[in-house]
Image (cartoon, grey):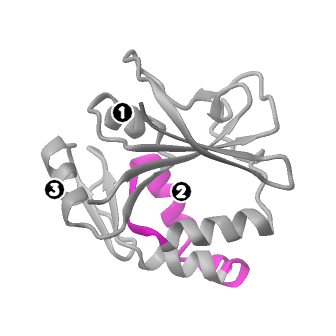
Amino acid sequence: MSQLILFNMMTIDGFFEGPDHELDWHQVEAEFNQFAIEQLDSAGALIFGRITYELMASYWPTTGATKDDPDVAYRMNTIPKIVFSTTLESADWTNTELKKSIVKEDIEKLKQRSGKDIFILGSANLASTFRQLGLIDEYRVMVNPIILGKGNPLFPNSDKRENLSLYNSRTFHNGNVLVIYRKA
């Protein structure tokens, strides 16, 4: 059975993006790109909320992305994707399915039939909903060595406590630290 894994970048003070949705603080370099490729190679599907989907779909299919980062672009463009949105009318990025609502049983069936893991990338609001429904099996948080002072939290609108156990960690040369937690 596949695991549903949340991956997100985060600041030391707990924000996944700045107050104006800026991500310019992400520390991404060769070591991170190799990690991203390995992570994408283990993905059977990617899940996005509308905002993250629109951001990703506006970049990865472009010639700039395929020129600047062909390995990641190839994977992002070929891996099956699901976008959850009540406002999108269509999802035109290759291999993307649009869903209007989250049905817990549908996600559980997807986990049973997929041979590889399923990743939620970004999408803090969607991740909060999935967490509230008990669907996330593993949390991979890449902590960047920066304090923004203000921004948007990784789990907005979350009022449910969840105990986790440290599964693994990895330190990157640029100061990023990946922590991997699983349900306790």
Residue 151 horizontal/vertical position (percent): 66, 27
Local SS, label 1: helix
Magenta-drawn stretch contains 166: no
Q: Quadrant of residue 68?
A: bottom right
Which residue is located at x 77 percent, y 66 percent? 31
Going from N to C along the chain, the mark reached first, 3 or 2, is 2
Q: Indicate which disc residue 131 carries.
A: 1
What separation in Å lies between label 3 and label 2 (alpha carbons)? 28 Å
Viewer-side residue, 90 vs 52: 52
Look at label 2 and name its amino acid: Leu
Residue range corresponding to the magenta coloring? 42-69
Q: Quadrant of residue 173?
A: bottom right
Looking at the image, the residue that sits furthest to the right is 174
Mark 2 secondary-structure assignment:
helix
Could you tell me how far apart the alpha carbons at marks 1 and 2 are, in whole angstroms?
22 Å
Q: Is residue 37 above or below residue 162?
A: below
Specify whether 153 is left or right of 67.
left
Height in image: 20 above or below 112?
above
Rendered image: mark on residue 55: 2
Is 161 left, or right, of 170 in this rendering? left
Task: Give left or right: position of 107 versus 14.
Answer: left
Q: Percent from the top left, x then y, of residue 87? A: 29, 45
The percent coordinates of residue 118 (x first, y second) are 37, 59
The quarter of the rendered structure image containing the N terminus is: bottom left
Q: Nearer the viewer, mark 3 or mark 2?
A: 3
Q: From the image, tell me which residue sits under label 3.
A: 109
Establish if 78 lies above or below 59: below
Contact check, label 1 and label 3, Cβ < 8 Å: no
Residue type, numbered disc 1:
Arg
